[in-house]
Each structure stands twice: as C-alpha cells, then as structure tokens.
Amino acid sequence: MKKIALHWQILIGIVGGILLGLLCVQFTGGKQFVIDWIKPFGTIFINLLKLIAIPLISVSLIKGVSDLKDTAQLSGLGLRTFGMYILTTVVAVTIGLGLVNLMQPGSFISEKTRQEMLQSFGREVQAKVDEATGVQQTRGPLQPLIAIVPELPENDGA
C-alpha cells in the first residue's frame, strides 16, 4: 500500500479538525466538549512548541556559523538572513493589512447592536483595560524575554 505524503496528511488533518469543530458546535454541549477535551491538547502542543523554539533556533544558528570555512562568508550570510527577515515581515504585514482593509471586520455590526454591546460589556472592558494598564506599568524591561519561556503548572500537592 502506498503511503500518503506528509503534506497531504497535514492537509487532511486540518480539514478534519475544521469539520470536527463545525460538527461539535452544532450539538448541545459540543462547545463545552471542545473546551474540556480538545483544547487542552492544543494548549500542550503550543507550549511544547514554545519550549523547543528558542533552543532549536540557537543551535541552528551556532551550527551554521561553526560550519563556515571562511569568516568572510559570515557577513554575507548575515546580510541575506536579515534581508529575508525584513522581506518576510513586509509580506506578512502587507497581507494582513490587505485582508483587514478588504474584509473590514466589525463593519457588519449595526449601530443598535454596538450600543447594546457597549451597555452590556462596557464596564467589563473598562475593568480589563485598567487592569492591563496597571500590569503594563509594573512590567520590567525584560518581561518579553521572560514571556518567551512557558510557565510550568504549580504542583498543588496531588
């Protein structure tokens, strides 16, 4: 039997996940099922990716630099790497801004619905904004570096 190529397996998994998500939302308790039983696996996966990303990038850079025979190649490699970073960033920002301007999210909400939402959630939103402002003011300069490393759950004696 012929094995399915990896890219097809990934695409099948993505489509299957979308279909499962749409199916679960249609049933009573489906959303809670997804939150209780499926979301934790996604959270674990993302935390594992966070955990491995920095060491993987560091080791790749160190290995790449150590394999260079001539140190003059390092400056050219650095310039190409920086150029690719800038290029991919510009492409990503352009795509994002283009899609936002094309789709205009939130423009379909009527003024009446906006006013109802402001009355319902206005206090909650303001409380969150105040909380975020307080946290932002107490953050140190290295907080983004600290946030890169995922937190391990505390052991509650179990």
Image (spheres, grey):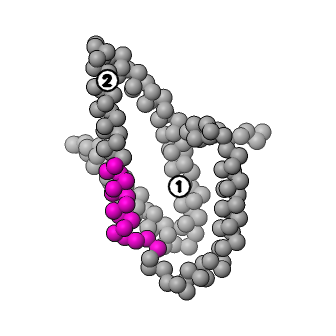
The residue closer to the viewer here, 7 or 120, is: 120
Task: Name the amino acid, label 2.
Answer: Ser
Residue 66 at x, y = what percent? 36, 16
Q: Residue 129 occupies which quadrant of the picture?
A: bottom right
Residue shown at 43% from the left, 62% from the top:
20
Residue 112 at x, y = what percent? 55, 86
Which residue extends farthest left? 2
> Quadrant of the image for the N terminus?
top left
> Quadrant of the image for the C terminus?
top right
Helix, strand or loop status at disc 1: helix
Give the left or right position of residue 82, taking residue 37 as reference.
left
Residue shown at 31% from the left, 23% from the top:
75
Q: Which residue is mark 1?
A: 38
In reply to whether residue 94 is colored magenta, the answer given is yes
Label 1 and label 2: CA atoms lie apart by: 46 Å
Q: Which residue is mark 2?
A: 75
Query: Could you tell me if residue 64 is visible in this image?
Result: yes
Residue 34 at x, y = what percent? 54, 60
Query: Could you tell me if residue 150 is visible in this image?
Result: no
Helix, strand or loop status at disc 2: helix
Residue shown at 40% from the left, 71% from the top:
104
Q: Residues within 10 Å of mark 1 (few under 14, many from 20)?
A: few
Q: Residues within 10 Å of mark 2 (few under 14, many from 20)?
A: few
- Disc nearer the start of the sequence (1/2): 1
Task: Name the amino acid, label 1.
Answer: Ile
Overall secondary structure of the magenta section: helix
Residues rendered magenta in the picture? 90-106
Which residue extends farthest right? 157
- Above or below, 51 against 131 in this view is above
Which residue extends farthest bottom? 112
